[in-house]
Image (cartoon, grey):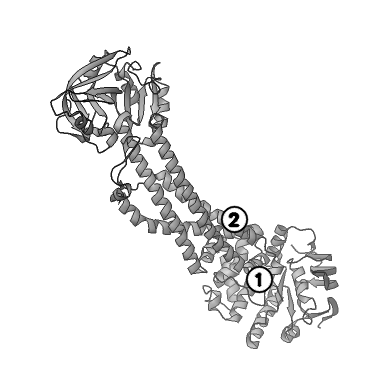
Amino acid sequence: MSESNGTIVSMRDVKKVYEQGSIEVHALRGIDLTIQKGEFTAICGPSGSGKTTTLNLIGALDAPTSGDITIEGESLLGKSRKQLSQLRRDRIGFVFQAYNLMPVLTAYENAEIVLAVQGVPYEERHGKVMKLLADVGLEGMEDRKPMELSGGQQQRVAVARAIASNPAIVLADEPTANVDSETADRLLDMMETLNREAGITFLFSTHDSRVMDRARRVVRIVDGAVESDETKA
Amino acid sequence: MQGTSLTVFAWRNLWRNRRRTLLTLASISFGVFLAVLMTGITDRHYSDMIDLAAKVGSGHVTIQHPEYLDTPTMSRSVNGMEALAATAAANPQVVTSAPRILGPAMIATANDSFGGMLIAIDPEHESADTLSILDAVEGGEMFTSADDKGIILGAKLADNLGAQIGDRVVYTLTDRGGEMTSGVARLRARVATGSPSIDGSLSMLAIGALREALGYGPDEATQLAIFIDDQRRSGEVARGLRSQLPEGATALAWHELQRELSAFIAMDTGGATFMQVVLAILISAGIFNTLFVSVMERLREFGILLAIGFSPSRLFRLVILESFWLGVAGLVMSVAVTAGPYLYLVTNGLDTSGLLGGEMDIAGVGMPTHLKVGLFPASALLIATAAMAATLLAGLYPAWRAGRVEPVESIRMV
């Protein structure tokens, strides 16, 4: 599952061009980026700089116009829709800005769904999900539907869903954008703890200075190119 | 707390827009309700008609001379009726059988004469269960034996002839050699069925008396009328018997003998089937609309599911399962909606005499004026299957559309 040198994500000269009618929009102009196992990295930059496109490409939700992306050494090029969905299922966790939980499922079921899709036996996944929900501070709320939870609680469920299958990396798109600062701090505390104690690799796309302050590495993208890449001591 | 299975997920999705789902279920129920009533009326009505037709003359299956159907003369007779009856009785579907002589005859009194149909029966083998007109015998007595010398006439024929009970009636017909032969009988009773064609032309003799007049042997007749417990198996029983019969005899199902009635039923059933297909298409369009709108409203959600690891085929299955649940719930509601009216119509029926303008018959078979329903189990299964199939088919395109969602377009991570 993991590459021997610990590289989780590798982007090599990745370009992405969108065609809007007859106009070509160069979203990414040759990105080179490597994410190592255990990193807690934030990609920042102004709106339209290409950070979301970068996350979409790493998450195999979109395909680059040129260049190559590997996840744990496995190239995404030439993979079918089915193979990409399997890769997302097994190796990538997503945390979205708007939580994006399934409204008809309970907190428990939302966290469990990826494991169910993976075919993990019920007994095994039940124990794991219950522990995960306890770890993210939702003990006793397993049976609540998303609309019965606060924004912060919903985002905790989303984090639990993202890490339930032990993915190689969790891609978090503006995870603190829709919550108040106190909740944002608690969410970041939780993700930092998961990163530090469970070794889960996080990659954020963010405008939030709190996320950038906590990140141990900050990659700044401007106009589709990496402007700076700083690792904190 | 149960695990998250796709079926549970689909079931809950179905109830996200409760009003829309209930409206769709109502349309399914309405369709099934109409289909059950239409088919139930058809099943019961035609089954009754066929049973009645069998009891009016020739049974559900008839053993007769192979040429009798095209040339119904007295020379086309069959011998060995008792042995043939034993062969028929060996089939578990067969309830009973009765030998008969049928043919055209001229009936005359001192006042007048009319042509009509003559049936000679053995009273020991006949009852109202084999010859329904025996229920309509009035104003006299039934034959006491196969050699009884009396005659029974249709009430209208008797009136036309001016014949009273006890009057002498002369019957004339051609014998096996094509010669005219006559017999004299006393009017024993009248038959008043309500069917104009029967009451106006029927005459009945005891089989022994006619055998004597025709020069037939003691075990000879023009047909053996066979009655089975389910008219739908007439063809099967006839085919089975055909292979066991001696030369000079064949077995025909009711629909091969009563072609006019059979054609009427086929035409009417075909029309009803067409109407049901139209109904199914209209209802399927409603189901399609519900499922398609439901899918289009959830494209973002499908994008999320694809992002977290659902495959396109799993999304396809999810929407198909929603169709499946819609079908199942629709059938459950259909049963609830249909059961009451159905049971009422099974027992009480609908009085259609006003619509029909009184008594009427088709191919000599009286049409029941009280329309009762009675759905064959096979028809019920067919309706349920058709409702499920229509629901699943209506879900195919929405399911395919769900599987084609591009996650990056539907999620928009910005």
The amino acid pointed to by label 2 is Leu
In front here: A215 or B30? B30
From the image, state whether disc 1 or disc 2 is nearer to you. 2
Q: Name the subunit of mark 1.
A: A
How far from the left and from the top, in percent, is residue B72?
A: 36, 21
Q: Quadrant of residue A109?
A: bottom right
- Kindly identify which residue carries mark 2: B396
Residue sitting at x 38%, y 44%: B43
- In the picture, the disc for residue B160 is none
Q: Is residue B373 left or right of residue A232?
A: left
Residue sitting at x 80%, y 61%: A77
Q: Is mark 1 on a helix, strand or loop?
A: helix
Up/down of A30 relative to B117, above or below: below
Q: How crowded is mark 1: few (under 14 residues within 10 Å), some or many (20 or more)?
A: many
Q: Name the subunit of mark 2.
A: B
Q: How crowded is mark 2: few (under 14 residues within 10 Å), some or many (20 or more)?
A: some
Q: How many marks?
A: 2
Q: Is residue B293 left or right of residue B214?
A: right
In space, the residues marked 1 and 2 are separated at their CA atoms by 31 Å
Residue sitting at x 32%, y 27%: B225
- Kindly identify which residue carries mark 1: A162
How far from the left and from the top, in percent, is residue A132?
A: 60, 72
Q: What element carries label 2?
A: helix
